[in-house]
């Protein structure tokens, strides 16, 4: 008895491959979006943890004299996942961007506050980070938050300098928010965050540097 066996036609196979391709692309896009959200939340957690640990470490000190990446690592206030060696000074965020920590100027004290700056933040994540409630009252410790699309490889350095050297006053703007300001207060509005996180020329994929100043 002969059994007639008929395989799938080329058109059917191409159809199956097309469906698999669409599902794969959708899966990759969904995974990429989920990972981006995870890393965004991770950066927020990292900055909050570092700030809390700094305030605890220096609670008995008059100011933040001597604070640096190296001190932060060796004293254990930086999560181990953010640096490679305990003897080094390179700290990275969840996106792989660089982090800089150090004292900042306040009225009457050149080291009365501290700044945490980082870069390598995707623009879409930048908006989520800036619109997070970092605290807008005097008890939160937040003096200012600054964000700007990176200009060169040292975006974190530029962002750090922007806040750490401004001891007397900070002029609020769309990319620099301070507690209590009616237009440029904290958290950032969506409009101000969008201005701060995206370059003037739309379509450019430029990462963003963000700096936080605390007292």
Image (spheres, rainbow, N blue to C red):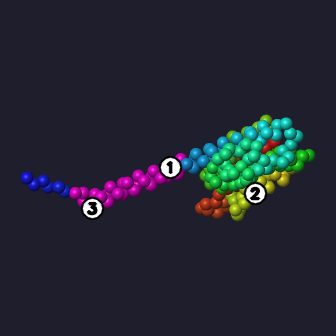
Q: Residues within 10 Å of mark 1 (few under 14, many from 20)?
A: few
Residue 19: where, in percent of width, then height?
A: 36, 54
- Give the quadrant of the C terminus: top right
Pointer 2: what residue? 157
Left or right of 29 in this view: 210: right
Going from the N terminus, do you reach mark 2 or mark 1 first?
1
* Towards the viewer: 26 or 60: 60
Mark 1 or mark 3: which comes first in sequence? 3
Q: Residue at x 49, y 49 (%)?
A: 30
Q: Is residue 12 magenta?
A: yes
Question: For the point 80% across and 55% down, which residue is it?
Answer: 161
Helix, strand or loop under label 2: helix
The magenta region covers 7-34
Q: Dot 3 corresponds to which residue?
A: 10
Residue wearing tag 1: 31
The part of the image, by quadrant, that contains residue 5 is: bottom left
Badge 3 element: helix
Q: Is residue 177 left or right of residue 126?
A: right
Q: Secondary structure at mark 1?
A: helix
Q: Nearer the viewer, residue 191 or 176?
A: 176
Give the residue drawn at x 40%, y 56%.
Answer: 21
Q: Quadrant of residue 206?
A: bottom right
What residue is shown at x 24% (from left), y 59% (from top)? 9
Local crowd size for mark 2, using a 10 Å CA cut-off: few (<14), some (14–19), many (≥20)? some
Q: Nearer the viewer, residue 198 or 166?
A: 166
**Residue 146 point in image, percent of width and height:** 74, 51
């Amino acid at each position: 008895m002969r059994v007639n066996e008929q395989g799938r036609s080329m058109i059917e196979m191409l159809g199956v491959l097309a469906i698999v391709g669409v599902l794969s692309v959708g899966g990759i896009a969904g995974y990429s979006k989920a990972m981006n959200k995870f890393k965004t939340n991770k950066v927020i957690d990292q900055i909050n943890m570092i700030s809390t640990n700094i305030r605890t470490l220096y609670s008995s000190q008059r100011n933040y004299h001597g604070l640096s990446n190296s001190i932060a690592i060796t004293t254990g206030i930086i999560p181990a996942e953010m640096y490679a060696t305990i003897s080094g000074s390179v700290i990275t965020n969840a996106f792989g961007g660089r982090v800089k920590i150090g004292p900042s100027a306040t009225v009457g004290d050149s080291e009365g506050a501290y700044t945490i700056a980082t870069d390598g933040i995707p623009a879409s994540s930048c908006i989520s980070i800036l619109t997070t409630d970092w605290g807008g009252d005097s008890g939160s410790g937040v003096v200012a938050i600054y964000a700007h699309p990176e200009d060169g490889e040292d975006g974190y350095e530029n962002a750090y300098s922007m806040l750490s050297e401004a001891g007397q006053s900070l002029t609020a703007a769309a990319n620099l928010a301070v507690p209590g300001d009616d237009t440029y207060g904290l958290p950032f509005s969506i409009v101000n965050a969008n201005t701060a996180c995206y370059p003037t020329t739309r379509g450019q994929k430029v990462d963003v540097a963000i700096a936080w100043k605390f007292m």
